[in-house]
Image (cartoon, grey):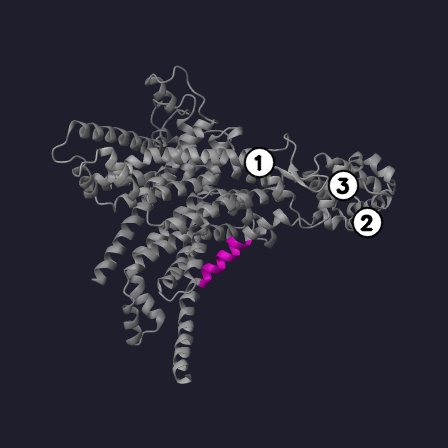
């Protein structure tokens, strides 16, 4: 479709140049993120190709040593807590926002999205200062709350998108038929927007699981997460164990977000089918 | 009259109670945001202008200074009051906090304040002469300018300092000595890096976004996944990948040597070039996706129409296509620029000492120097720049951040 039906030489040249440039850009985009993968299976301890040999020794380090295992456990615990909180609060908020009568929308929506815009160092330093005053610094609860703040915009947006196709008459129908609001929610609305909610939850989990700046300020030595362990490792001495950890984190993020996107797409399609 | 107005009034009343129900659903998250996001930021920013440490520690000195009234080094009673304040601060254990605080305004004051307080608590420094002997800085005009500004709990010192400015002895605002002027350079560097990265992502992203709109749907979906894969990988993981790539014996240097582009291995780690390469890679999808979403809505027939009416390809592109995609270009570039201003992880891991951006200075003031006031003042400037650009973006471009995931 790039060329017209009877392309001139100039047109062919321009199309070829565009393709050439774009292939270089795609190589630049994609190759770097996969570089740690082969290195993580390297049996030597250097970061150079060709590999000395294949081995899983660095995965044994990451999955076997107490330090890394504790970090993975902390990441899962904090990620789980933040996901549950952000999903519940974000879904409720998205349902509220989907009501055309929602007041002061112009004020509320930018506020809900602002955690994505405010530089994360400012959020982290402010949270550390404030939490230290009220005794929440160096607690799991504090880190989970801070991550909930960072993750909630993703839930509001994904659930909001799946609600755009939701027919509000269905909720009116349930109440006319005598169902209490919570019955209508759990039996009619939630099943229909569930893919959107699950997709928001996946985004929330990935946000928390990847986050390192807030954790760096709020966590004590026992609360170190996988990204924080990686970050300090990268700052101090570069060990191939980091490439194994990076590969694991990347695999988990990409897997979850592919699932999230398939779910989000399905929820939009379901919703639009229902409207028709 | 009343018979018309009454029903309208009651309808409006019912509307209000109905509009409260959706707000109640959003209330828990809004409350959490106020508690765990709004309050922390306010608490931090207030540190930039409200600093009561000196005022709390030196109440008598403040009183005596008001009575003294003059500028420059004050008379005997102020020194007597200062000795009494220091004695009490020493007894209450507040003197270290005071000395540290004065030191941020008056470099070198820390040890002298501690010595003067020790002597004062032994009643050996109750006169002007003895105090100046214990702490020679107290004989200088600029020290008293610092103390005079410090005894007011509200201060503009740190905000001015963030712009390399200060109150001079004669009460006007002037530049700080060039040896202490660092922040304008750091802001300039942050904006420079953000500009270069934004332009680089545009140069790389614009043609690719255009290509995707011209591909068959299956092919376009495949290329889009290739763009989204790095987008979904965390900044930390991508930065880690670049620390591996940019090593002196890393892949990028291997490639450059093999292509014959360089004759020696380049020092890319801890350099500005390495930082810009990595940031461009991380930001590329953020610039590309808004451009792509606008380009998708431009019908290709317009370009064909322009060309069939005799426009050369370049003219058709410049006069017909570009004006229609400019909103997407501006949105993508502004988004990347805003996000670049707040970069922290990548400069720490890939940048050298002279490539640290404003966020790194904020973190460093908190972690290493425990100077919350300076961190707060720099946060204020960073936040104001970011939010100003964000408001411009939403107001004038109507960009919806979330039509691109």
Identify the subunit bearing mark 2.
B
Report crowding for label 2: few under 14, some 14 to 19, many 20 or more residues within 10 A (C-alpha). some
| Farthest front residue in view | B310
Q: Specify the label residue B144 is tagged with.
A: 3
Secondary structure under tag 2 reads helix
Q: Specify the label residue B64 is tagged with.
A: 2
Q: Is B76 left, or right, of B183 in this rendering?
A: right
* Residue in the image at 42% along x and 72% along y: B16
Q: A15 or B379: which is nearer to us?
A: A15
**Is B277 colored magenta in this rendering?**
no
On the question of residue B193 being in view, the answer is yes
The residue where tag 1 is placed is B183
Question: Which numbered disc, 1 or 2, marks the residue that appears first in the sequence?
Answer: 2
The magenta stretch is B27-39
Q: Are marks 1 and 2 in contact (CB under 8 Å)?
A: no
Q: Is B329 left, or right, of B159 in this rendering?
A: left
Q: B24 or B297: which is nearer to us?
A: B297
Q: Position of residue B208 (x, y in %)?
A: 28, 36
Badges 3 and 1, same chain = yes
Q: Position of residue A163 (x, y in %)?
A: 31, 60
Report crowding for label 3: few under 14, some 14 to 19, many 20 or more residues within 10 A (C-alpha). many
């Amino acid at each position: 479709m790039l060329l017209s039906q009877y392309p001139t030489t100039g047109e062919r040249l321009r199309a070829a140049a565009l393709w050439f440039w774009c292939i270089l850009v795609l190589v630049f985009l994609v190759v770097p993120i996969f570089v740690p993968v082969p290195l993580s299976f390297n049996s030597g301890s250097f970061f150079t190709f060709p590999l000395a040999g294949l081995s899983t020794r660095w995965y044994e380090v990451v999955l076997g040593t107490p330090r890394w295992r504790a970090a993975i456990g902390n990441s899962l615990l904090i990620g789980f807590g933040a996901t549950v909180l952000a999903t519940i609060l974000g879904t409720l908020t998205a349902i509220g926002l989907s009501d055309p009568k929602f007041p002061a929308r112009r004020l509320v929506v930018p506020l809900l999205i602002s955690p994505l815009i405010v530089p994360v160092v400012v959020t982290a330093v402010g949270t550390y200062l404030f939490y230290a005053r009220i005794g929440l610094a160096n607690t799991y609860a504090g880190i989970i709350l801070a991550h909930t703040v960072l993750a909630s915009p993703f839930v509001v947006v994904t659930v909001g998108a799946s609600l755009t196709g939701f027919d509000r008459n269905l909720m009116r129908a349930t109440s006319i038929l005598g169902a209490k609001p919570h019955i209508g929610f759990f039996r009619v609305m939630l099943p229909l927007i569930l893919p959107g909610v699950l997709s928001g939850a996946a985004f929330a989990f990935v946000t928390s699981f990847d986050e390192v700046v807030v954790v760096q300020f709020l966590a004590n030595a026992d609360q170190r997460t996988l990204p924080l362990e990686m970050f300090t490792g990268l700052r101090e001495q570069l060990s191939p164990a980091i490439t194994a950890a990076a590969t694991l984190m990347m695999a988990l993020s990409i897997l979850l977000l592919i699932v999230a996107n398939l779910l989000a797409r399905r929820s939009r399609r379901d919703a639009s089918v229902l409207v028709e | 009259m009343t018979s018309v107005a009454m029903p309208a009034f009651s309808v409006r009343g019912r509307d209000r109670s109905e509009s409260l129900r959706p707000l109640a659903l959003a209330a828990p998250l809004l409350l959490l945001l106020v508690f765990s996001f709004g309050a922390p930021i306010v608490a931090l920013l207030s540190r930039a202008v409200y600093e009561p440490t000196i005022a709390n520690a030196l109440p008598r000195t403040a009183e005596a200074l008001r009575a003294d009234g003059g500028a420059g080094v004050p008379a005997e009673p102020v020194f007597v009051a200062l000795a009494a304040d220091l004695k009490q601060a020493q007894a209450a254990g507040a003197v270290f906090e005071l000395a540290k605080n004065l030191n941020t305004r008056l470099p070198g004051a820390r040890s002298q304040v501690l010595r003067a307080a020790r002597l004062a608590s032994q009643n050996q420094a109750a006169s002007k002469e003895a105090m100046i002997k214990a702490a020679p800085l107290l004989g200088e005009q600029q020290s008293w300018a610092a103390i005079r500004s410090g005894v007011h709990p509200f201060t503009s010192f740190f905000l001015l300092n963030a712009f390399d400015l200060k109150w001079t002895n004669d009460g006007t605002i002037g530049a700080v000595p060039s040896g202490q002027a660092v922040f304008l350079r750091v802001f300039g560097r942050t904006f420079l890096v953000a500009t270069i990265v934004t332009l680089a992502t545009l140069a790389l992203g614009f043609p690719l976004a255009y290509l995707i709109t011209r591909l068959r749907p299956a092919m376009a979906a495949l290329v889009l996944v290739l763009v989204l894969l790095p987008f979904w990988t965390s900044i930390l993981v991508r930065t880690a990948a670049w620390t591996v790539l940019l090593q002196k014996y890393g892949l990028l240097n291997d490639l450059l040597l093999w292509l014959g582009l360089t004759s020696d291995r380049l020092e890319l780690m801890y350099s500005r070039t390495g930082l810009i390469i990595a940031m461009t890679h991380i930001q590329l999808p953020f610039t590309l996706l808004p451009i792509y979403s606008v380009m998708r809505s431009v019908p290709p027939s317009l370009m064909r129409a322009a060309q069939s009416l005799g426009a050369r390809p370049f003219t058709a592109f410049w006069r017909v296509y570009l004006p229609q995609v400019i909103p997407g270009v501006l949105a993508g570039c502004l988004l990347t620029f805003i996000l670049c201003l707040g970069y922290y992880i990548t400069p720490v891991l890939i940048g050298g000492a002279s490539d640290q951006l404003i966020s790194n200075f904020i973190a460093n003031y908190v972690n290493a120097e425990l100077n919350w006031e300076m961190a707060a003042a720099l946060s204020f400037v960073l936040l104001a720049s970011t939010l100003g650009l964000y408001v411009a973006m939403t107001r004038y471009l109507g960009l919806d951040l979330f039509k691109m995931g």
